[in-house]
Amino acid sequence: MPNYIKIFLLFVVIAPNGFGQEKEPTTPEATEFYEPVPPKVIPGTNGTPPSDAIVLFDGKDFDQWISSVDSMAVKWHLNEDGSMTVKDKAGNIQTKKNFGSVQLHLEWKSPAEVQREGQNRANSGVFIQQRYEVQVLDNNDNPTYTNGQVGSIYKQGVPLAMASVPTGEWNTYDIIFHAPEFSRGGNIVEPATVTVLHNGVLIQDHFVIEGTIKYIGWPKYQAHGKAPLVLQDHKDNSRVSFRNIWVRELD
Amino acid sequence: MPNYIKIFLLFVVIAPNGFGQEKEPTTPEATEFYEPVPPKVIPGTNGTPPSDAIVLFDGKDFDQWISSVDSMAVKWHLNEDGSMTVKDKAGNIQTKKNFGSVQLHLEWKSPAEVQREGQNRANSGVFIQQRYEVQVLDNNDNPTYTNGQVGSIYKQGVPLAMASVPTGEWNTYDIIFHAPEFSRGGNIVEPATVTVLHNGVLIQDHFVIEGTIKYIGWPKYQAHGKAPLVLQDHKDNSRVSFRNIWVRELD
Amino acid sequence: MPNYIKIFLLFVVIAPNGFGQEKEPTTPEATEFYEPVPPKVIPGTNGTPPSDAIVLFDGKDFDQWISSVDSMAVKWHLNEDGSMTVKDKAGNIQTKKNFGSVQLHLEWKSPAEVQREGQNRANSGVFIQQRYEVQVLDNNDNPTYTNGQVGSIYKQGVPLAMASVPTGEWNTYDIIFHAPEFSRGGNIVEPATVTVLHNGVLIQDHFVIEGTIKYIGWPKYQAHGKAPLVLQDHKDNSRVSFRNIWVRELD
Amino acid sequence: MPNYIKIFLLFVVIAPNGFGQEKEPTTPEATEFYEPVPPKVIPGTNGTPPSDAIVLFDGKDFDQWISSVDSMAVKWHLNEDGSMTVKDKAGNIQTKKNFGSVQLHLEWKSPAEVQREGQNRANSGVFIQQRYEVQVLDNNDNPTYTNGQVGSIYKQGVPLAMASVPTGEWNTYDIIFHAPEFSRGGNIVEPATVTVLHNGVLIQDHFVIEGTIKYIGWPKYQAHGKAPLVLQDHKDNSRVSFRNIWVRELD
């Protein structure tokens, strides 16, 4: 549902009555509504997918993904334990499907054996809509710039906390992302927002994204529509692994 | 037109297209609209009423007004020059008609003979919707608190400039007021705003009103609907005069 | 951190530059920041408290709680399995501590043995700040009004999905709540918002709360400060159980 | 004053107190403020410039203007009655000075002798910041598309009324314009707004401008700073005249 409709509905619900036109109800029943009925969803357990989720990776294959380099088959490692690992220099991978606003779950792990420092330690990233990166990094005893540390919205949003598990163990990201909305002419009208729970700890709290991330320069929005989810090959043999990736579409 | 509808229309006009759904026009005609046709209004000259204005006072009578004290006939002075003058202790007067958002024009004059100081110098006020006061005061060589000086939104909004004519001459107020909007439960949802030109000089610039004015205490909104325009008797023989009062309804 | 500061910071970060005053950076380092450093938090597992959480209930005692009826000791049942169960007619219970914006985790369970229908089936509620209720109800094969069903913001916000586990099993609520902000005079300036994950499924998505809930009538805000968390005794022998309750303060 | 400061101040004034931190005043004096003192401005009469205005054209010369074609001296007609008239094919003219938010007054007149129809009748325009056009057109008995008629924000904002004087007489435009604000990266953050009184009649009421006007296509913002005021040569021998042009800077 586009935001302007949501905002309209919001105003219909909470807003002006011209005062006195909508009488204060006098019975409980007057404020009880029966339709529409929300869908029933069977929840997962410990991060496994709910019944209405689109499973993007369950460890069996790369069927939902292509290489971002050549749009061909993914060349990353498919592991026997149901995870995948970035293959150095193989390039980013991305979903075949495009997404707007989503609830996104994924799990990631740095290799237990530590190599290099700062941004060159185990480094990857989750690029929502190909543009807005939630940083993946082994930050344990490995300081870096705070707007580039694990859980940051890269070069924009410092996380509220550093909530990683020990290096080599599985981290979870539970992400609620709302896609930006643009005017017909291409102006940003409603910036994207993102909420992130890192291992259950709130680290991004309805953060307002400032625009497409730039490595050099200020973020800026360029109008776009639905777009793939991208996982990053940081091209330094970072060997980050991922598993249990699913989304629920929110629009 | 209530604000939520305006906001909705605003969003329809300027807002989201899901990108790519609404194609960029390729002809000039594609962005030219013919309906609805705005009404034709014959403008006044030098502040006299446009053809679609509701004339509240043209100097002939108090037909549009009642006393705020007893809802009876107005006891203020009706002058031969087409103006009215506050009668001391006669109390405030108010329009019979209730108003929402309006463009309001009025003219006021302090007596040429100066008496007393500060707020006790020639003092009156224009209470829009009975609650939101644009201060009327002879401030010439008569300093007072800035949020109570001529052109202030009393106890809230300091004017951007002090633009009075010499004491004893006619001042004009051209006011654009948008009524506040409340939720069905009575919360303030959209605060009132006011723009004031004092003798043609912008002194309140889309000022966001904080609530009903209190002489003692912080302003607070109480839900209300359309309400009369009130002119103040400050009860200290201030003898402020008014003339040429008209409104155009904006909703 | 109060919202007006956050909004100010937001504007400092994303907003106006007068154009040309803040030059586009030409190096990566120009957009990398090192301070302040976010705190390190050791996450829990499967909903157990992170290291910086305030544990409100861990199954051992009611030390963090009092009765809402008489401010005396809580008379609900303390169970051997580390949970508590509502004691019929014992009344609501509430935390001793007051809270503003929080991340809140709790788990709840309906009795396996089903009794009664609709709102009279196992019914309780989580009243954030004593006023804003996230509904707790056994809705399995038990329809009721949608703005009163499990996971609703009672009488306001229909959940996006019905994501309960089978009756008799433990449900989780992960809640991100932002307290409302009021003007100095008591107007609502920034409505409260709430996000709820029910068993990991997003069911309230930054929902804008309309005011204090009324059983009869429209919601309305009354200015308030920090306030306790309340758990409801619905007074119909609903026998809902709770466990593992913790909060992280967000302001 | 940039908008983010204004918004910050707004929040300081009207917004959150954490409740109970800022006590309700108990004396009138507690809500009376004395500094800073607004500047004194001597108002004009009938649209003549107030004492603090920048006079852009008083009929004597084109000293404040250059040709938009070649940045050289203006080639429009300077008339003996203190007005100027567009010279056909001489091109637009613009102020030497750049402006942000302004109160702008100007007067314009169509030639008494009517020629041609629609947009080809006496046509000119006031381009605020070189981009946002308030349409100037002889619409008397001359219908055209409503978002291109006299007083429209061209191709965007239909005027609330058609308030022209008879062809050949002088019209006034009193305009309150707030410049758009852009993020450091160039996103539109605060759209421009414009209020227009046409011969004293409110025809644009805090209209939110959607972007730089395009003759073909949707409006779109491009980040910019202060910019000149431009008067249009519509290049069809429209012979529109202007006089009495002044601005007051609002930032």
Image (tube, coloured by chain):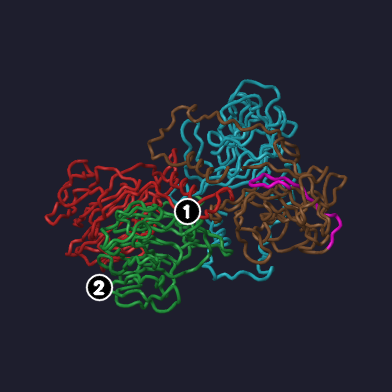
Chain colours: A green, B cyan, C red, D brown
As for residue D100 lying within the magenta part, the answer is yes
x then y, percent, for residue A157? 42, 54
Residue A99 sits in quarter: bottom left
Determine which quarter of the picture holds residue A77.
bottom left
Mark nearer the viewer, 1 or 2: 2
Task: Identify the residue under disc 2.
Answer: A81
Which numbered marker is on residue A15?
1
Dot 1 falls on a residue whose secondary structure is loop
**The one of B89 and A116 positioned closer to us in this rendering:** A116
Confirm whether residue A34 shows in the render: no
Residue C116 located left or right of residue D132: left
Which x, y percent locates residue C161? 34, 65
Amino acid beneath label 2:
Asp
- Quadrant of the image containing the N terminus of chain B: bottom right
The lab-note entry on whether marks 1 and 2 share a chain reads yes
Q: Position of residue A246 (x, y in %)?
A: 34, 69
Majority secondary structure in the magenta region: loop
Whether B122 is drawn above or below C118: the answer is: above
Percent from the top left, x then y, of residue B182? 48, 49
- Numbered tag placed on residue B199 in the rendering: none
Whether residue B143 is visible here, answered yes or no, is yes
Determine whether the residue tagged by mark 2 lies in a helix, strand or loop. loop
Looking at the rendering, the stretch of residues picked out in magenta corresponds to: D96-115
The front one of B65 and A130 is: A130
Q: Nearer the viewer, residue A250 or B140?
A: A250
